[in-house]
Image (cartoon, rainbow, N blue to C red):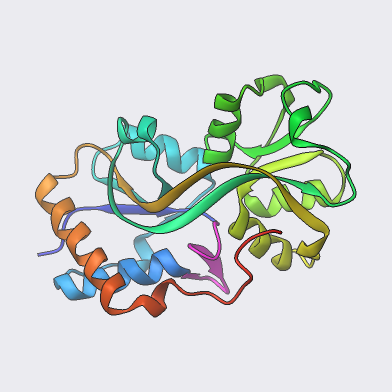
Amino acid sequence: MSPDIQWYTEEYPPFNYQSEGKLHGLAFNVLKSAYHDLGWFLDESDIVLAPWPRVYKTIQQYENKCVFSMVYTKPRAKLFNFVGLVIPNTIAVIAHKDSGVKAEQLTRDKSLTFGVVKNDIGHLSLLEYGIPESQFVYLKTGLELVRMIDYKRVDLIAYGDAIARFQFKRADIDPNNYRLLLPLVDSKLGYACNKSVPKSVLQKLDKAINSVVLSKPELLRYHDSDSFE
């Protein structure tokens, strides 16, 4: 019998995103395969695609809600239960190659502006790094981030490096014009649920996801150079 879970996701390609009205992505494909192997039904039309701030708040506040995908951190592990931590992901500060900004300037130069998605791991990592809220420009999606830095309306962005490269290409912006200025977090992406979801369900799902990745590693491959130079 399928569990009573409402799934949420956001535009975070190549892991989860919408194209031509349908959901796609590596994390989505793995979840579908895990559900199939468990004999559970995943109603794709019932999955909510929403901006990350709304998703993040909803998963915390409401029972039986889960999200794909989310970067694991220790503080987040206190708020959510994670399963299927199988996808590596580097979060970084990204700059234009011609900007001249250096890593040592980030905490000293108070004139710098950082494009972030609120409560995204890039935003939270910059807070831990010592960047004050006053220097953030909040945007709803990664696509908006790459457009804003290309328009020179922010100096830097903090986001997953592979995801940013993917978004640059979607926006018809040459990713080779950008560089990884400072890695912030090397972690893993997985699936996160409200604490109300039964542990027995999470254990089955975690086992199924790991089994899928071992038996079908091609589901986690995508054709890109994966990171900035």
Residue located at (80% from left, 47% from top): 149
The part of the chain drawn in magenta is 12-24
In the rendered image, the vertical position of residue 222 relative to residue 81, given as above or below: below
Left or right side of 115 for 38: left
In the rendered image, the vertical position of residue 79 relative to residue 157, given as above or below: above
Query: What percent of the width, then of the height, locates residue 4?
Result: 18, 53
Residue located at (79% from left, 64% from top): 176
Residue located at (24% from left, 45% from top): 64
Left or right side of 147 for 213: left
In the rendered image, the vertical position of residue 78 relative to residue 15, given as above or below: above
Left or right side of 63 for 144: right
In the rendered image, the vertical position of residue 147 relative to residue 208, given as above or below: above
Can the viewer see residue 67 in this picture? Answer: yes
Pick the residue in front: 33 or 84: 84
Query: What percent of the width, then of the height, locates residue 144?
Result: 71, 50
Q: Quadrant of residue 112?
A: top right
The reply to whether the magenta stretch includes residue 21 is yes
Q: Quadrant of residue 61?
A: top left
Residue located at (84% from left, 38% from top): 101
Q: Quadrant of the C terminus?
A: bottom right
* Numbered-mark total: 0
Q: Quadrant of the N terminus?
A: bottom left
